[in-house]
Image: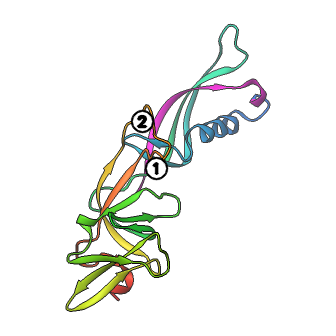
């Protein structure tokens, strides 16, 4: 789920940061550039783990900032296919579920990957959502926001940035995780204990 990725980056360090220790100033700039950002094929940056090397310190003509070539490692959130993760229910609709890890909310379980057979019914507590019910041995097992939900990572996508976005459309997500609940041991934890 978490991994270290080593990156080399040419960093411009503004003059007002030159009074700080070099490693501290560079780490602060790297955090501003990379924290909470998705890097395609690498995942979501959680933190700057360490700085491996700093080279340069050149000041280009007409620029008061110094430029460094920095090699550093980032702690990334990047689940692998088939990994089982526990999350919380964020919303439920007729198209499926949306789950959240707290720091990442773009996890979707489409209706085709819900436990089979299952159906949806109006949620008595929230008129804008539905409640999914798994039917097993003539009993109904609801998927609600009470328990953590285990899901298996089915796919990870890094969509390209749209040139235009409609006013009514949902916000752009640079990393989308599609999950599955259609296997033994998956779904709300209360189902299996």
> 87 or 84, which is in the foreground?
87
Q: State the mark number for residue 161.
A: 2
**Magenta-span inclusion, residue 8:** yes
SS category of the residue bearing label 2: loop
Of the numbered discs 2 and 1, the one sitting upstream in the chain is: 2
Q: Nearer the viewer, residue 66 or 109?
A: 109
Q: Which residues are magenta?
A: 1-17
Q: Is residue 181 left or right of residue 52?
A: left
**On the picture, is 74 further left or further right than 40?**
right
The N terminus, quarter of image? bottom left
Residue nearer the viewer, 131 or 73: 131
Inter-mark Cα distance, 2 to 1? 14 Å
> In this orientation, which residue lies closer to the viewer: 13 or 135?
135
Label 1 crowd bin: few (<14), some (14–19), many (20+), radius 10 Å? few
Q: How is the model colour-coded?
A: rainbow
Disc 1 designates what residue? 170
Question: Which residue is drawn at the image coordinates 55% and 32% (left, top)?
Answer: 53
Query: Where in the figure is residue 16, as x and y percent of width and height?
Result: 78, 28
The structure residue drawn at horizontal position 41% and vertical position 35%, both measured from the top left corner, is 162
Please determine whether, in this image, residue 90 is positioned above or below residue 15: below
Q: On the rendered structure, is 146 left or right of 111?
A: right
User: What residue appears at the point 46 percent right and 50 percent down from the top-left corner?
Assistant: 170
Place of residue 74 in the rendered image (x, y in percent of width and height, measured from the top left) = 50, 45
Q: Quadrant of the C terminus?
A: bottom left
Q: Is residue 45 above or below residue 109?
A: above
């Amino acid at each position: 789920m978490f991994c270290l990725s080593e990156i080399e980056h040419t960093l411009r360090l503004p003059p007002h940061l030159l009074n700080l220790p070099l490693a501290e100033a560079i780490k602060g700039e790297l955090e501003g550039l990379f924290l909470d950002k998705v890097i395609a094929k690498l995942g979501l940056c959680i933190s700057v783990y360490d700085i491996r090397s700093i080279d340069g310190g050149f000041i280009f003509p007409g620029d008061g900032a110094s430029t460094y070539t920095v090699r550093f490692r980032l702690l990334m959130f990047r689940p692998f296919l088939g990994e089982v993760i526990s999350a919380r229910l964020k919303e439920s609709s007729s198209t499926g579920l949306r789950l959240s890890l707290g720091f990442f909310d773009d996890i979707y379980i489409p209706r085709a990957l819900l436990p089979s057979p299952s159906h949806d019914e109006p949620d008595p507590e929230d008129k804008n959502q539905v409640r999914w019910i798994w039917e097993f041995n003539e009993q109904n097992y609801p998927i609600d926001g009470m328990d953590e939900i285990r899901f298996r990572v089915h796919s990870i996508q890094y969509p390209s940035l749209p040139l235009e976005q409609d006013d009514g459309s949902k916000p752009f997500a640079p990393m989308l995780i599609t999950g599955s609940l259609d296997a033994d041991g998956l779904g709300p934890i209360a189902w299996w204990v």
